[in-house]
């Protein structure tokens, strides 16, 4: 039988605000444990929450970026459950009236673009962190109260691969809006998944299971593939699927059932009496629209149209808004867009990968790159020299000007200088000259190499080739 | 209207209370009485009435995204029944829920 | 002046040592003398005034126990907004008063620190839950006290102890630092000997607070000034139908006496009907306990409070141990009730219905208060009852709140002022309810009642 996989994802993104959602504590990642807490986020008796305006603004941005409807009046609710890293015994969240709903994002698939619906985006607060050790559980409440957006997709995803693409696309969009870093390693993006399978063509959904504890997008993909496989195997063996929560174990590469709970969850949601509603206005939303950055799709088409770049190049350059920003800063006032594209895609991205850094940590500033490539464009240095200079710039942090000047790396374009040098080389290799003249013309490369070796790559290629050919061909007569 | 013993035990579980046998009996009886009294509200037709969340007509109480001082960890941990100087501690549990 | 304050406090401390009535939970002498020294330098409207604070309000450096074992070891690391304001105004905070555990009760018998006895008659309860604060004022230990009122917890003990208790409009006084019982009902308010003292303290504590999202940005008048205005021409509504049965004869007589005194000052009375008043207690006990069940979830013994330091089978037993040991019977009862009405399958039938009836009750009050300047009825149907009389019958105890809870449901301001005493010389309270943010009106009426007594 052919089976259809049905997946819905719940993504939590941590917002990049200065202060927490309901109090003034800092949100700095990696601070000493329990150093960023106050009566409000510690759930002290009598402390009360006051909503951070930036959380609302961020939610509106996320809504606008995902074609969501914005709810003009929305409120908060308490989600009640007990856990040591949840100080108040409830999480302030949204329930019946999420601030954004009915949105979608478009993901690339082999059959073209596909819409994945978003049921809702709502504001809530993060919990603290628990660490289980041999002699007890340790609780750090620094993270407690940091604002989150929960983004819930429709069950529109049809394969683990699609789930992966959905996540990368969503991450790209959210990062473009600037509201979150979406860094899964630092926990600023987290993902839970729901999966069910059904015979192809069947309308009703199968029994679903929930998957948690995935630590990377690939982890999500693998967990979903594992679970889809498990469910199909079960059903084909005539066993029913049990509705349950499974934890992905990265070590064993298996999804293991969470120990069954003593009782099913009953979160007893009710309106949060300590907060008042948020009432949006057209003007407020307009203000947010006015400061919304360009989104990936718009930027991609602009790169193709405005810079005349291929779709493939544009996709690479706009994958992250920081790379696109870098490109646009570097290409400012520079004549050869294709050359710039070539160098950023080839060299800059290689450096980032080697050093495992992001582009905003790149040792070569856009202007430094432009200065270097201007030498190249004006043929003052050879492409080979340019690479050497770039490596030097990375190592020393010095400018192209300085390195070229210090090491005397300007191209040798003087015909006289090259002529003498080339004649010398030709005379030193009579065997090769003979073979060349007998028709083994590919030896031209050998001679070019010898010249480059002698000049440390500084010889102008065009002139060198010209002179070489003159020497090799001329004596043939 | 009455409440069953099982319901009382279920609620106690949800509320993280462990009850003695006498308490279970007492609360089954007393909560039953109170719930019975509360049935009074069924006399009213409230089909077209909006649920009231708050008596206030205030909206949009927001603060600017600015930092305020946090408490000192030393002070905070002084209030904690168990800590290790950095973290709050919860005794080792044999199984997590 | 400075010396006289210190003498007064020394004398008070001596007197307090002589009494075995647990009116106070905490008086920390070291803290107090340091505090007196600091406050002596401040010139303000409350300079030299000695104030008691209900033990559910946070005062930095003192424990806030809420009369519960679970908070026995908790020290406040911050001041409630009202406390900050009192400090700035020069007031002296004597200590923390006894109460019903987490403000749940009407007799101050549900306290882990023992039941408070009514200073007027020690065989009787002082009312609750602010019974310690009311008793401290009634017995003359302090000039003023702060209480909190969720369903009558300021007004009822004021009525039982012959003091003046004011519950401000919901949103008038910041709740920041008040340990929440039922967040959409709770208000802090003054308990004093006289109405002008009540106005004086309200002047200091009222106003918008940026740390409480539910505090209202409505200008605060000088209540001492409004007190001087005449009440002539005011129309006050009385729901006579509520007083037909269940109200003791002496209470009714005292109430009628108040009416005749106000009539002499030119106040006119109008018979009104509160159709939904009968549903107030049921509504209150659904909504307030629901909020309470969530508000009290934070008491788990992890970050503060008392915990069970033993090897446990699972997390559930950890919580259950800490909470079951820490909470008293009434608190458990209300947590259970509140959990029940919010639980899956019952939410609509109880909680949502409760919210709808809340709307009906509140709208009725709002409509009436557009027609009259204030409403008036007794604060309680009886005078102070005997210790132990209702403690084992929770429903009977709840029904005591019949005249007070509807005011919290509608979020309105109300004041209880002593009328002519009832049988055995026991105090009787007369309650005046005003329109939202019009504390001035009820203070004026209360002030008039008080002056006509002399």
Image (cartoon, grey):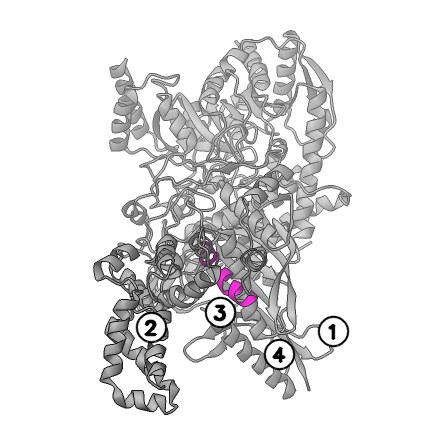
Q: Which residue is mark 4?
A: A241
Mark 3 or mark 2, earlier in chain? 3
The residues bearing labels 4 and 3 have C-alpha atoms spaced at a distance of 25 Å
Seen in the picture, residue C50 relative to C150 is either above or below; the reply is above
Q: CA distance from mark 3 to mark 2?
A: 51 Å
**Between tags 1 and 4, which lies in front?**
1
Is residue A318 in the magenta section? yes
* A434 to the left or right of C160: left
Point out residue A53 in the picture as x, y percentages from the top left corner: 51, 41
Q: Nearer the viewer, mark 4 or mark 3?
A: 3
> Considering only order in the chain, which callout, 4 or 1, is on the residue closer to the N terminus?
1
Callout 2 secondary element: helix
Spatial CA distance of label 3 from label 1 is 29 Å
| Pointers 4 and 3 in contact (C-beta within 8 Å) | no
Q: Main secondary structure of the magenta part?
A: helix
Q: Residues under labels 1 and 4: Cα distance?
A: 17 Å
Q: Which mark is residue A464?
A: 2
The number of callouts visible is 4
Q: Residue at x 51, y 59 (%)?
A: A12
> Residue A285's spot in the image, x, y percent?
60, 42
The magenta segment is: A311-325
Q: Which residue is mark 1?
A: A203
Q: In what quadrant of the picture does the C terminus of chain A appear? A: bottom left
Distance CA(mark 2)–CA(mark 4): 73 Å
**x and y, in percent, of residue A421 in the image:** 24, 74
Above or below, comparing residue C438 to residue A386 in the picture:
above
């Amino acid at each position: 039988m052919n089976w259809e996989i049905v997946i819905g994802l719940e993504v939590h993104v941590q917002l990049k605000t200065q202060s927490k959602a309901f109090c003034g504590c800092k949100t700095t990642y990696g601070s000493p444990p329990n150093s960023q807490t106050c009566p409000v986020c510690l759930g002290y008796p009598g402390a009360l929450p006051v909503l951070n305006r930036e959380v609302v603004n961020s939610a509106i941005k996320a809504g606008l970026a995902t074609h969501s409807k914005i709810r003009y009046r929305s409120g908060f609710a308490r989600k009640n459950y007990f856990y040591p890293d949840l100080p108040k015994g409830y999480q302030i969240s949204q329930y019946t009236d999420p601030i954004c709903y009915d949105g979608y994002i478009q993901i690339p698939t082999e059959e073209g673009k596909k819409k994945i619906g978003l049921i809702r985006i709502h504001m809530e607060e993060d919990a603290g962190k628990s660490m289980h050790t041999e002699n007890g559980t340790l609780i750090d409440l620094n993270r407690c109260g940091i604002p989150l957006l929960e983004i819930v997709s429709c069950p529109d995803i049809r394969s683990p691969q699609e789930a992966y693409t959905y996540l990368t696309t969503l991450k790209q969009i959210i990062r473009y809006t600037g509201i979150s870093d979406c860094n899964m390693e630092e926990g600023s993006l987290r993902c839970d998944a729901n999966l069910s399978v059904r015979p192809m063509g069947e309308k009703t959904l199968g029994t679903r299971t929930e998957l948690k504890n995935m630590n990377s997008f690939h982890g999500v993909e693998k967990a979903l593939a594992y679970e889809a496989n498990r469910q199909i195997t079960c059903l084909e063996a005539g066993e029913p699927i049990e509705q349950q929560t499974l934890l992905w174990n990265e070590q064993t590469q298996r999804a293991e059932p969470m120990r069954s709970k003593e009782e099913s969850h009953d979160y007893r949601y009710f309106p949060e009496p300590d907060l008042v509603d948020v009432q949006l206005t057209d003007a407020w939303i307009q203000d947010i629209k006015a400061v919304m950055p360009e989104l990936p799709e718009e930027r991609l088409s602009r790169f193709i149209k405005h810079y005349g770049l291929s779709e493939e190049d544009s996709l690479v350059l706009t994958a992250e808004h920081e790379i696109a920003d870098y490109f646009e800063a570097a290409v400012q006032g520079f004549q050869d867009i294709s050359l710039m594209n070539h160098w950023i895609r080839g060299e800059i991205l290689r450096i980032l990968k080697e050093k495992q850094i992001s582009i905003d940590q790149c040792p070569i500033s856009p202007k430094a790159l432009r200065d270097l490539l201007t030498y190249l464009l004006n043929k003052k240095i050879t492409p080979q020299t340019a690479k050497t200079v770039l490596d030097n710039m990375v190592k020393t942090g010095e400018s192209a000007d300085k390195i070229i000047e210090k090491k005397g790396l300007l191209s040798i374009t003087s015909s006289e200088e090259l002529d003498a040098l080339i004649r010398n080389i030709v005379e030193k290799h009579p065997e090769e000259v003979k073979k060349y003249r007998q028709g083994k013309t590919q030896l031209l490369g050998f001679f070019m190499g010898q010249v480059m070796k002698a000049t440390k790559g500084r010889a102008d290629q065009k002139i060198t080739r010209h002179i070489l050919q003159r020497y090799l061909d001329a004596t043939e007569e | 209207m009455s409440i069953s013993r099982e319901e009382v035990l279920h609620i106690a579980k949800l509320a993280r209370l462990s009850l003695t046998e006498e308490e279970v009996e007492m609360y089954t009886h007393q909560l039953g009485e109170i719930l019975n009294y509360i049935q009074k509200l069924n006399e009213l037709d409230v089909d077209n009435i909006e649920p009231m969340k708050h008596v206030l007509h205030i909206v949009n109480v927001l603060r600017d995204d600015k930092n305020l001082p946090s408490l000192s960890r030393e002070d905070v941990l002084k209030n904690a029944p168990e800590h290790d100087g950095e973290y709050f501690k919860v005794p080792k549990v044999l199984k997590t829920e | 002046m400075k010396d006289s304050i210190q003498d007064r406090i020394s004398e008070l401390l001596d007197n307090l040592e002589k009494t075995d009535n647990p009116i106070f939970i905490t008086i920390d002498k070291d803290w107090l003398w340091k505090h007196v020294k600091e406050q002596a330098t401040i010139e303000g409207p409350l300079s030299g005034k000695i104030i008691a604070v209900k033990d559910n309000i946070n005062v930095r450096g003192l424990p806030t126990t809420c009369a519960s074992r679970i908070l026995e070891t908790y020290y406040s690391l911050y001041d409630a907004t009202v406390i900050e304001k009192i400090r700035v105004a020069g007031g002296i905070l004597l200590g923390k008063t006894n109460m019903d555990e987490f403000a749940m009760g009407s007799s101050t018998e549900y306290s882990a620190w023992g039941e408070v006895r009514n200073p007027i008659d020690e065989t009787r309860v002082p009312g609750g839950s602010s019974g310690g604060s009311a008793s401290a004022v009634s017995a003359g230990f302090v000039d003023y006290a702060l209480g909190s009122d969720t369903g009558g917890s300021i007004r009822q003990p004021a009525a039982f102890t012959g003091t003046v208790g004011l519950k401000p409009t919901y949103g008038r006084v910041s709740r920041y630092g008040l340990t929440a019982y039922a967040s959409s009902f709770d208000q802090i308010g003054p308990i004093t000997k006289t109405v002008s003292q009540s106005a004086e303290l309200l002047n200091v504590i009222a106003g918008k607070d940026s740390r409480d999202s539910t505090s209202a940005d409505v200008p605060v008048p000088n209540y001492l000034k409004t007190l001087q205005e005449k009440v002539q021409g005011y129309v006050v509504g009385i729901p006579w139908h509520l007083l037909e049965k269940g109200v003791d004869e002496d209470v009714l007589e005292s109430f009628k006496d108040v009416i005749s005194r106000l009539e002499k000052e030119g106040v006119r009375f109008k018979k009104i009907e509160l159709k939904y008043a009968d549903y107030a207690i049921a509504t209150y006990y659904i909504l307030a306990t629901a909020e309470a069940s969530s508000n009290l979830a934070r008491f788990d013994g992890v970050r503060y409070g008392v915990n069970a330091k033993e090897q446990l089978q699972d997390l559930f037993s950890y919580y259950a141990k800490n909470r079951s040991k820490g909470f008293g019977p009434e608190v458990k009862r209300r947590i259970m009730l509140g959990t029940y009405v919010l639980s899956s399958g019952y939410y609509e039938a109880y909680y949502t219905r409760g919210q709808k009836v809340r709307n009906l009750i509140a709208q009725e009050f709002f409509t009436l208060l557009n027609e009259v300047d204030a409403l008036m009825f007794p604060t309680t149907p009886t005078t102070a009852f005997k210790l132990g009389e209702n403690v084992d019958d929770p429903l009977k105890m709840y029904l005591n709140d019949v005249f007070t809870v509807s005011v919290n449901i509608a979020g309105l301001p109300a004041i209880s002022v002593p009328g002519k005493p009832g049988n055995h010389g026991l105090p009787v309270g007369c309650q005046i309810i005003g329109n939202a943010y019009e504390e001035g009106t009820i203070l004026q009426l209360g002030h008039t009642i008080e002056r006509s007594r002399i």
